[in-house]
Amino acid sequence: MEIDVVLCNHAETAENRLYVAGGGINLYFVPPSVPHVITVGLGCVIHVPYLATNASHHLRVALIDQDAEPVAPWSPEVDLPAVESQQSFNIGRPPIIEVGDEQTVAMALNFPNLPLRSTGLYEFEVTIDGNVMRRMPFRVGIAPSTARFQVSNR
């Protein structure tokens, strides 16, 4: 089994088609104050070989930090569970499929307004049936200051 994954601002699926907005992200600029809030999505297309159809499979996406530790959303009041999404899928074999054909399953995962405690390197670890298939790294950094100019009406 194989998987294509793209980091984006937002992803959704309809009729097993993947739609992404703002795809190809690997850098987020945030204000210096905590929490550092980002909105991130993952668009996934899973390639299921013929012999893996008609069977249950499990997709897991987990956010980890640069020390390979699970990341929980930042909260000043309570401890929240780690950022993770799990989905099961099972694709059948329509009559048109021949031995050796593969099929695809499109999935969209979104993490809107995700508050992070610190800047640095993060990655989404994507596993299928317990096997790490992809790692999608991205960096969160403080937005560079912009030069301010005064406009004169002289």
Image (cartoon, rainbow, N blue to C red):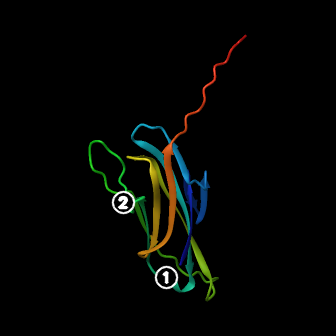
Residue closest to the far top: 154
Q: Is residue 114 above or below residue 87?
A: above
Q: Where on the picture, by quarter, is residue 43?
A: bottom right
Residue ID at (32%, 44%) = 75
Can you say which quadrant of the picture contains the C terminus?
A: top right
Q: Where on the picture, by quarter, is residue 13?
A: bottom right
Q: Residues within 10 Å of mark 2 (few under 14, many from 20)?
A: some
Query: Which disc, if any, is residue 128?
Result: none
Amino acid tagged 1 = Asn
As rendered, which of 145 and 26 lies closer to the eye?
Answer: 145
Query: Which disc, if any, is residue 70?
Result: 2
The residue identified by callout 1 is 54
Residue ID at (36%, 61%) = 69
Cβ atoms at labels 1 and 2 below 8 Å apart = no
Q: Is residue 109 above or below residue 103?
A: above
Q: Is residue 74 left or right of residue 12?
A: left
Q: Where on the picture, by quarter, is residue 144?
A: top right
SS of the residue under disc 2: loop
As rendered, which of 65 and 45 lies closer to the eye?
Answer: 65
Q: What percent of the width, then of the height, locates residue 15? A: 59, 64
Amino acid tagged 2 = Pro
Q: How many marks?
A: 2
SS of the residue under disc 1: loop
Q: Is residue 30 above or below residue 89?
A: above
Residue ID at (35%, 47%) = 74
